[in-house]
Amino acid sequence: MDLLDAALRCDRPHGRYAYVAPFYAQAKDVVWTYLKQYTTNIPGAAVNETELRVDLPNGARVRLYGADNPDRMRGVYLDGVILDEFADMDPRAWSEVLRPALSDRKGWAVFIGTPKGKNTFYEVYNSAVKAADWFALRLRASETHLVDGDELEDARRMMTPEQFEQEYECSFEAAIVGAYYGRDMAQASKDGRIRSVPWEPSEPVYTAWDLGLDDATAIWFAQVIGSEIRLIDYFETNNTALRDIPRMLLNEKPYTYAEHYLPHDVEIRELMSGISRKTQLEQLGLRPITVAQRVAIEDGINSARAILPKCYFDETKCERGIECLKQYQREWDERLKVFRQKPLHDWTSHGADAFRYLATTLEPKTSAMDFRPSAPPPTASWMAI
């Protein structure tokens, strides 16, 4: 209704307003019926079913989008946008696409959602609280009384404390419901293991990769120092050719590499060239490559959980990778109302999969290592920085 009101009152030519959900299909399910219902009596309003948009008689337009395809929104300008369930979106949809789209017309944005840990939604909310020209509102069920008291108590009994705090009390501190590593990452934050983590030049670096479709690649950079696994860097791209990545690692990163861990499908030969991506990467100077053992996803997740208590994450260089681990979660079965025994495939998958390959390959080695640090260890001094 706010979008429609703003669009009808727009005094600029060709006003453009958008509603964005985490997924395009979700936007259609949640909003499209309402948008058509509330514009049906506006004289001259035209509905476009194919593009999920309504054109208004003053030339303004309201359109639905999904953050799962942010490139679809590139190049547009916007006078106003509502981002619904922002905590579930790839944060780059806002920073790289929607925020620039508002600049030409100095448009406005509204962020709505349920907290899912201390992610980008948390950062936006905190910024809004501190900024004089923003409006911020947190609606806790226990304070608004919008939900009947008996219903609230019944929900509290039926849900885990984390679920209740997140869904009804708008808690950013509660672990994400269904998240594989939610409690582990919350503990890492509580222990001070998400902080500035220095690169130790005298020690080698291990990398762990996930190679996805459409040139999507995620890479973790780790060092093993004494009893610690230090995640010093993270790289992710969706538009870099595979042949260019070794050059970046070898020429632009200052690290000395011990091993590069890649997923098992890297050995599959391409039909056109007859060689595998492993061979291609080796020819480009990426050595030595270790192919991660093919294990069940649940076993890989357990390996990741086993090493997480030993991990320290650089909060700046690994920011996106950290968010991937915090929000990597089980797929929800809407019909049965239960979590499926498989991960949800979304923007968190590449970073989480790369970390899983790191765990399954590095964990057996670190478990067998003598963790008595060499003398003198740098560990005590860097933690005091």
Image: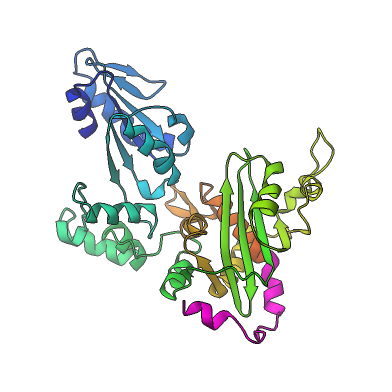
Residue 334, compared with residue 123, is above or below; it is above
Which quadrant of the rendered structure holds the N terminus? top left
Left or right of residue 14, residue 232 in this image: right
Let me know if residue 22 appears in the view.
no
User: Residue 76 at x, y = what percent?
Assistant: 39, 27
Residue extending farthest right: 274
x 68%, y 64%: residue: 206
x 73%, y 62%: residue: 259
Left or right of residue 234, residue 326 in this image: left
Left or right of residue 285, residue 1 in this image: left
User: Residue 296 at x, y = what percent?
Assistant: 66, 59
Left or right of residue 368, residue 116 in this image: left
Let me know if residue 17 appears in the view.
yes
User: Residue 106 at x, y = what percent?
Assistant: 27, 33
Residue extending farthest top: 44
x 33%, y 41%: residue: 83
- Magenta-colored stretch includes residue 382: yes
Q: Please identify the quarter of the rendering in which residue 36 is found.
A: top left
Number of numbered callouts drawn: 0
Q: Nearer the viewer, residue 150 or 114?
A: 114
- Magenta-colored stretch includes residue 212: no
Q: Nearer the viewer, residue 94 or 139?
A: 94
**Which residues lie in the magenta part?**
361-385
User: Residue 161 at x, y = what percent?
Assistant: 33, 68
x 23%, y 64%: residue: 153
Q: Please identify the quarter of the rendering in which residue 170 is found.
A: bottom left
Residue 106, compared with residue 179, is above or below; it is above
Residue 304, compared with residue 225, is above or below; it is above
